[in-house]
Image: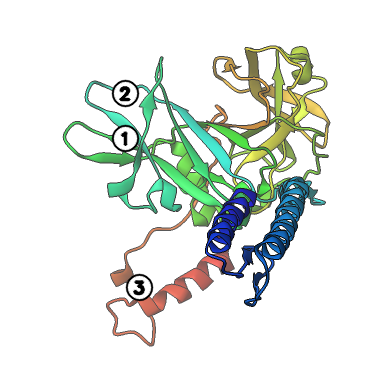
Amino acid sequence: MAKKIISNDVRATVAAKSAEAQNVSVAKSSSMHLRSIQQPNIKATNMSSSTKQRKNNNKSKETVSKEAEVVEQVAPTQRKVAKTQADVIKKTTKKKAVTSSADSTIAVHKTLHITFQIQFHTQYGQSLSILGNHPILGNNDIAHAVPMQYLHDGAWSIGISIPDAELLMEPIVYNYVLNNADGSVVYDWGTDKQIEPATIATSNLQVFDSWNHAGYTENAFYSVPFQQVLLKANHTPLTILPTAKATHLFKVKAPLLAKGQTLCLVGSSPALNKWNTQQPILLARKVDDVYFTCTLDLSDIDVPIAYKYGVYDVNKKEFVGYESSENRILLVGKQADTFTIVNDGFAVLPNHVWKGAGIAIPVFSLRSHQSLGVGEFADLPLLVDWCQKVGL
């Protein structure tokens, strides 16, 4: 800006000297930011005209000099204001997380980077994808399922980023999909694979999942009749204090635990009490959840860690027994600004311990005074009432 003002002043000086040579007493001085002044014609000698012109030129130079000083003084101030505004924005976007009274933390304005990994042995020509109810995961449209990458030893992985994760108040429900060479697909069973981005306080989340085969016997016990009626009374409420600065969440299912029983976790790490069954890590399950869960702080623990789930009697306060499987192995410890979810699927426990009795009758064999004598669906409530009356 200062250079442009000086250029205007030079042009004004040249014009004034030309006017002086032709004995024209006109002087003009311009300034881009302040004003334009046109001097009137004056009949005077060449000496007086030159003197006045030099004074005007000196004033213009002083004006240019002052404006240049102002520019030099304002520029650092503007930079300082811009830096202050940037600092304010930066501080505003880095608000501290607000921890709720439950076991969740609401994060504020961040992009959540999620890495999904699952162990699944595929055959030649097969591949895995992930599908969910979020646009990044294909919005449950199989045509837009996200292909996963094969790592090693049956491990498949994919990373996604969810902007403004704190705004997702609803959980993301997802499934894994097996793509066969002939174009057919097989879905990972169930709708219980869920994550809640708004409850993750870190910028990174890694999820280690287990494939849920539709043919697993345990899946039958998560149907509505079992969950809402037949097994509902077996739920054992248990309050476990959340772990401070938890780095890992372990979750596992066991549908056939008896009343007064829960799952526990023991392992080779000091955080898992060195296989001490007298002091196992207890897991708890909410009424409306299918998973038993616990959180651990593994920030100072070396990996790999060998561990197992077991059954614990809450009333007797004693360890009942281990699951009947090989040791599970945790290969990933604490990572910077990362929370880890370990979904171990089903605890390997006996799945034939539930026994029940019922009645099977074809509808056409039902008879009532209000039916036509060949059985109607309207007679089913009468059958249910009779079963309840006789204790079935």
What residue did someone put label 1 on?
Answer: 178
Residue at 72% across, 25% down:
320
Residues at discs 2 and 1 in contact (Cβ within 8 Å):
yes
Could you say whether the residue bearing mark 1 is in a helix, strand or loop?
A: strand
Q: What amino acid is found at the position of numbered circle 3 in the picture? A: Leu
Residue 366: numbered disc: 3
Left or right for 91, reference 189: right
Residue 348 placement (x, y as % from top left): 55, 27
Q: Is residue 64 above or below residue 217?
A: below
**Where is mark 2, residue-wise?**
122
Q: Which of 317/91 is in front?
A: 91
Q: Is 216 left or right of 162, judged from the image as shown?
A: left
Quarter containing the C terminus: bottom right
Q: In the image, which disc is placed on residue 81?
A: none
Compared to residue 61, the image places residue 25 above or below, namely: below
Answer few, some or many: residues within 10 Å of disc 1's Cα (few below 14, many 20 plus, some between 14 and 19): some
Q: CA distance from mark 2 to mark 1?
A: 9 Å
Question: In the rendered structure, which amino acid carries the disc numbered 2?
Answer: Thr
